[in-house]
Image (cartoon, rainbow, N blue to C red):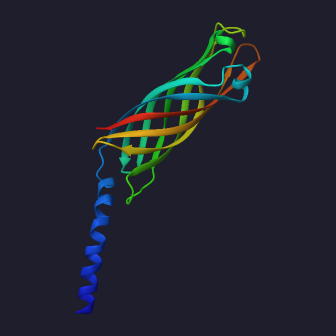
Amino acid sequence: MNRALVSACAALAAAPLARPALAQLDFTPFAVEVRAGTAIPRGRLDELDAGVFGVSVGGDLTYHLAPFLGVYAGYSWTRFEGEAGLGEYRDTGLDLGVRLGVPTPLIPIDPWIRAGAVLHRFESVGTDDVDFESDAEWGYEVGAGIGLGFLPKFTLTPQASYVRYRVGTGGENELEVEYIKVGIGLRLRL
């Protein structure tokens, strides 16, 4: 009799905890995200007087292989204004990678990390440096963020990421493009 009573009490106590866990497992396979934010030049890009901050926008489509694992493909555009407002530096290209959600069954946030490859090109227009446009070059990105759900299929996603790749600027010169993006996105699960 005591065992049955203890089992019943344990089941009743655990019932409210099961609902949030089940909600995270109820997933749809696709998600679309758009985002905007600022970019902070680092390393050699910072030495080019590319300004203190740049502007970054992008978006991607994610296919979820499992509730907490997805692959993404997207496009991003980043612009840095040259020193004293003269000219600009632009970074554009494709982003491909893996997104891993961190299970949080008892709290209403969705932390995640992502890592992948970038196929970007870099150009300098109207700056003191020689104007140039690079070929598309491979590099990498890593990032993290959290999802804050406010409607059943919509999520706000504050996030930060680090992007790095190398381009030729003509002759034997190479430029290592690296920057940190900080922004916010709007994610729709389809």
Q: Position of residue 72 (x, y in %)?
A: 43, 37
Q: Quadrant of the C terminus?
A: top left
101 relative to 45 in the view: left or right? left
Q: Position of residue 165 (x, y in %)?
A: 64, 29
Residue 107 visible in this rendered orientation of the protein: yes
Is residue 84 shown above or below 64?
A: above
Is residue 144 shown above or below 51?
A: below
Is residue 76 shown above or below 21?
A: above
Q: Residue at x 72, y 30 (%)?
A: 43
Would you identify the image quadrant in which residue 151 lies?
top left
182 relative to 48 in the view: left or right? left
- Name, please, the residue furthest toward the bottom: 1
Q: Residue at x 52, y 25 (%)?
A: 56
Q: Position of residue 19 (x, y in %)?
A: 28, 61
Would you identify the image quadrant in which residue 8 lies?
bottom left
148 relative to 44 in the view: left or right? left
- Name, please, the residue furthest toward the right: 172
Q: Position of residue 83 (x, y in %)?
A: 69, 14
Would you identify the image quadrant in which residue 148 lies?
top left
Q: Quadrant of the N terminus?
A: bottom left
Q: Residue at x 27, y 89 (%)?
A: 3
Is residue 67 shown above or below 90?
A: below
